[in-house]
Image (cartoon, rainbow, N blue to C red):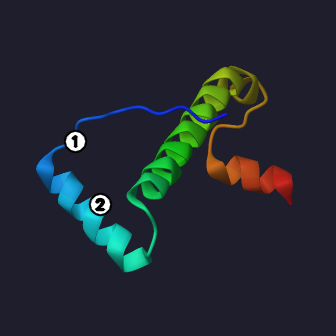
Amino acid sequence: MSQSITIKIPEEWYEELKSISRKEGKPQSELVRESLKQYLSLQKFRDLRKKSLPFAEAEGILTDEDVFRIMK
């Protein structure tokens, strides 16, 4: 089931959204949904990272390089 919301955005953003919508041939609402989906996914990742960070640090995993080394 889908829900609707109404938001207010600066005129400049609206004009950019309209322009991108025309260029990509996608409805504005689809572009906003895609953007929100990306934002929500990023927030989930950040939350997971925050929860797992103490465990990683306890194992000596402090950098991306540490992760890549372990993944090899």
Residue type highlighted by circle 2: Leu
Using residue 70 as the reference point, say whether residue 27 is left or right of it. left
Element type at mark 1: loop
**Residue 37, horizontal then vertical, whole percent:** 55, 45
> Residue 17: x and y, percent?
29, 60
Q: Nearer the viewer, residue 26 or 68?
A: 26
Toward the viewer: 44 or 2?
2
Residue at 54% x, 48% y is 38
Comparing 27 with 69, the one in front is 27
Mark before the other along the chain sequence, 2 or 1: 1
Residue density around tag 1, few if under 14, some if 14–19, many if 20 or more, within 10 Å = few
Residue at 64%, 31% in the rendered image:
49
Q: Residue furthest left?
A: 11
> What residue is shown with label 2?
17
- Evaluate if marks 2 and 1 touch, with contact meaning CB atoms under 8 Å apart: yes
Distance CA(mark 2)–CA(mark 1): 10 Å
Q: Quick one: SS at disc 2? A: helix
- Counting every numbered tag in the picture gives 2
Q: What residue type is labelled 1?
A: Ile
Name the residue tied to disc 1: 9
